[in-house]
Amino acid sequence: MRKTMVTGKAIRELILEHSYRAGVGHIGSNLSIADIIATLYSQFLNCADSDAKECDAFILSKGHAALALYAALYLYGDISRESLDTFCQDGTRLGVHPEYQLRGVEFSTGSLGMGLSYAVGMALALRLQDRGRKVYVLLSDGECNEGSTWEGAMVAAHQGLDHLTALVDVNGQQALGYTREVIGNAAATPRWSAFGWDAVEVDGHDVAAMAQAIRRPRDGRPRVLLCRTIFGRGVSFMEGKIAWHYLPVDDTQFAQALQDIERLA
Amino acid sequence: MRRAFFETLTEIACQDERIVLLTGDLGFMAVEGFQDRHPSRFFNVGVAEQNMVGMATGMAKAGMIPFCYSIIPFVLLRPYEFIRNGPVMHRLPVRIVGVGAGYDYGNNGFTHHGTEDLAVARVLPGMVVLAPADSAQMRSMLRQTWAQPGPAYFRIGRDDRPVMPGLDGAFDADRVALCRAGDAVLILTLSSIAPDVAVAASLLAEDGIESTVGVVGQLSPPPRDHLVELLSSFRLVVTVENHSIDGGIGSVIAEILAEENLNCRLVRCGFRIQLDGRTGRTAYLNQRQGLSPEALAASIARAHRGPL
């Protein structure tokens, strides 16, 4: 077990290194969830603690940020360095979006708006089986444009799935613009509350605050953490810039980005 | 076939606790038996079919065997991407159960008709596509297939009563179920139009044209070896389906004939025209597509006389 090694900073370094090597984008979306992933893998997901069949489930619904997940799986000890180094190479299991055939990945994702439904079904089945497993799902705020996300939200509340935790990466950006300019308010806290969820706003770069928000006692409702994050967090020239949904880094940018990450607390 | 489906599922669920039933808020006078017997495993997830299939995927991942029920376009077409990315890609035992084959929903209109479902279901890799001809075959089919590992699509007729003469509930995934024997022509069919095909075959026999009638209950993967054997011994095959002429059993047979280079002429009967908004009962709509028993018999007799 290497839980203590799963930190936001370590995940960010791996994101930059491997997106640079592979020449692929989605860097900003990966960086915005680094601390959320670190929170889950350092404090909650218990895969290494017990029988693999009984570990808590994590679903990365925003599949385009799979590199952050691979980084955590590597730091956690689920995948090897050699495996991580195949990211986006021909024949790899580590593509831009995650595939379930990779150890540690529950579902192949990449098409937005599906992960919450998977999570609701899993949570319901696990309750039927009385297995005591918890389910975590990480969504993007852009993903809250998808009607199916709200179909899942309704059923989760109706079924009282309080062992289900959704985390929304509220980085305020989506593929073609800022969320407020595309469909404003899609990920707003009152909307989740109105759908019957225990909705909590939290700093998505504050591991202790997110952990506390997850641990708070439950009252029969599913819980959602609206995690306020900064797109491209940690790299000065990426923060809040739409272009970094797409662009790979060149040599100079890579060096600058690593320096920026080094300065992060 | 709805009654047969739910009665059988309710019985099987007594043996296997993995079975759960999800409905998109449909199934009045149909789902209640299961609901009463297995209340903790019955979920009306509301009018939200995408989430229903997504949930079923999650449940199957956790070890359950979920059956998702609604009318064909709602349960197959609306959540098609969920089916593709969920049970198909993850190879999970989710059952998509669509009621209302072809024009079974008659004057409910185009929104309720199952007219291209076989085509879109059978192109999904690993998806088993099942289309029972009557209630007895529905029971056999479900009993034989419920525990299979991968995903399956059931195309169910709305009416409980019609019986396919000579079928006697037979189902074998590797065999065409032969319901009538004759040398002149091979007629292959499936689903709820099969009893009409039996009537057409009787009409043909009155005119001295003896046909072999086969029901292909599992369209995908098809009973290929048996089909090749049958097609090799006829000079004329006619396919009849209450489905678009493209992509269903007519297409399956065309593919096999071409790939096996068999010397057997194919005539496909199915939906060829887009209706104009005028609606009516199932028989009326089938008749407009040239699929009444009388029109079928006439088409087959014409084909039997030789190419135009």
Image (cartoon, coloured by chain):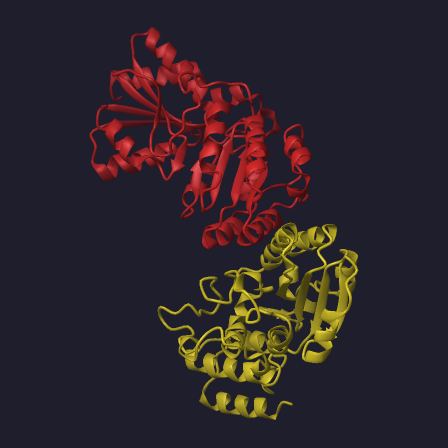
In the image, taking residue B210 as reference, residue B12 lies left or right, namely: right
In the image, taking residue B135 as reference, residue B21 lies left or right, namely: right
In the image, taking residue A58 as reference, residue B241 lies left or right, namely: left
Give the answer, above or below, for where B15 lies relative to A149: above
Nearest the viewer among B112 and B29 is B29
Residue B27 visible: yes
Residue pictured at 68% horizontal, 63% vertical:
A165
Residue B27, quarter of the rendered image: top right
User: Which part of the image, by quadrant, shows the N terminus of chain B?
Assistant: top right
Residue A171, quarter of the rendered image: bottom right
Residue A71 appears at what percent x and percent y?
A: 51, 77
Q: Colour of chain A?
A: yellow
User: Which part of the image, by quadrant, shows the C terminus of chain B?
Assistant: top left
Give the answer, above or below, for where B249 lies relative to B125: above
Residue B289 visible: no
Residue A131 appears at what percent x and percent y?
A: 63, 56
**Count of number-bearing discs:** 0
Q: Colour of chain B?
A: red
Nearest the viewer among A55 and A211 is A55
Residue pictured at 70% horizontal, 74% vertical:
A211
Residue pictured at 60% horizontal, 64% vertical:
A56
